[in-house]
Amino acid sequence: MSTSRTQFSTKLGILAATVGSAVGLGNIWRFPYEAGQGGGGAFLICYILFVFLIGVPAICAEFSLGRFSRSGMPVAYRKAASSRRWDFIGYASVIAAFLIISFYSVVAGWTLEYIVDSVLGLFQSTPDSSRHAQFADFTGSWKAVGWMVVFLLINAVVMLGGVQKGIERVSNILMPLLFLILIAFCINSLTMSGASEGLGFLFKPDFTKLTPEVVLGAMGQAFFSLSLGMGCMVTYASYFGDDTPLIKTSIRIALLDTLVAIMAGIIIFPAVFSFGMSPAEGPTLVFEVLPNIFHAMPGGRIWSTLFFILLATASLTSIISVSEIIVAFLCDDLSMSRRNATIVVTAISIVTGMLCSLSFGPLANLNLFNLFDFISSNILMTLGGLGICLFVGWKMDSKEVENQLRHENGHKNALYRYILFCIRYVAPAGILIVFIAGLL
Ligand code: PHE
């Protein structure tokens, strides 16, 4: 066990890095369109239930395994089980990580294009009616592929430079700023003509919309947004100090992450209804709605520049955490140097990212973008979540789990028993039922 393994330097840094991983495109881009397709309020209620009944216990499980083993995937399982029998979950995580990087970097590339468009004032100079066609042209083009590559190269530079100090520092400053800006946008959206319709859509549940597929979608979204089920939190926890309170940190991540998703909904849906758009538009929703908001807003050019810089940064802190899973695997399991590992990850992701990006153009029939998203979030991450809960709940030495979870800064955490119960029973049963019903 490498006692010399790097660690995050401060508690705030740990929170900023883990929240930085959780908060990203999943909250601001994916949540609104998933909720839009899932009928709004009913989706939101399922989502929140999943976050707290399954998400928080699963983060605790990932944290326990990561800090105990001080390793990434799949070595963490191997150390805790003293056998290679559970390695397959770790390998599935690495595959899921590749799938996620592939489509995530495409959307992150779109945010870079939008930064440039904002600076040039393009949202102000083009009419709202042309957005749909313009965006469709852009996403299907090689320009979008170019931005995806730029994003992956920025990611590689940060990965090469050593994550902890860079990411910790960047996250400490940018995460609070992102919150402030989101609050400003929420207030702006509440003044729009479609505000009550939008808020009604988001907060008034219509349970007739709840099909098993929507419920599976809500669970997949909870896992995606919390960066769960693929060892991301295991890998980050392998860099935690011994005194980091695991349960408390998990709850904070879940609260902040959910807050950002709800704020994104409050920003998007009033605008969707004000501009006569359909909430069920799909992955392009946010990118077509936001320019309309910026067009109508006083000082829209500055706001939109700031917004997309923050969104790009939030995406960066997330994609770094996904890359870290693969880099940690290549370094810990295959003894590669960090530099070579980063090069391998970047090279493969550029190819798979290109295939996803062209899904909006020449490769529309193949649509790998949606396929990768579905396989990673709704299948691999949910099954990975099941695996980690079963492993930590039933296989890992229970004394060790108690050591990791129960004692926080010399105090006993009162929620320990509840969390353990959820890790052992509630989460596995919930995941299995929703997963099987959703797929059937
Ligand atoms: N949670 C991130 C987001 O919401 C995405 C992510 C998924 C990051 C899986 C790491 C692992 O944008």
Image (cartoon, helix red, strand yellow):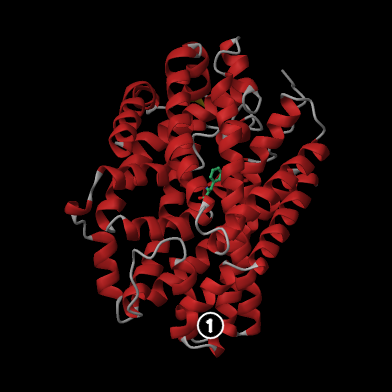
Residue 106's place in the image compared with 383, above or below, is: below
- Asked whether 326 or 296 is in front, the reply is 326
Residue 335 is left or right of residue 213, and the answer is right
Find residue 384 and report its horizontal and vertical position in percent: 48, 30
Location of residue 49 in the rendering, given as x and y in whole percent from the top left corner = 31, 42
Name the spot of residue 214 as percent of width and height, x first.
Answer: 30, 48
Image quadrant in which you'd find residue 55:
top left
Residue 321 appears in which quarter of the rendering? Answer: top right
- Give the answer, above or below, for where 340 lies relative to 71: below
Tell whether circle 1 marks a residue whose Cβ is less than 8 angstroms from ligand 1.
no
The type of residue carrying mark 1 is: Gly
Rendered-image quadrant of the N terminus = top right
- Mark 1 residue crowding within 10 angstroms, few (<14) / some (14–19) / many (20+): some
Instruction: From the top left corner, tell me how far across and down residue 382 is, in percent.
Output: 43, 35
Question: Disc 1 marks which residue?
Answer: 300
Position of the C terminus, as image quadrant, is top left
**Is residue 162 toward the left or the right of residue 229 in the image?**
right
Viewer-proximal residue, 4 or 362?
A: 362
| 27 versus 277 height, above or below | above
On the picture, is 238 further left or further right than 433?
right
Residue farthest to the left, as pictured: 208
Q: Can residue 117 be seen in this view?
A: yes
In-front residue for pair 78/162? 78
Q: State the SS at label 1.
A: helix
Is 397 located above or below residue 329 in the figure?
Answer: above
**Residue pictured at 71% horizontal, 44% vertical:** 348
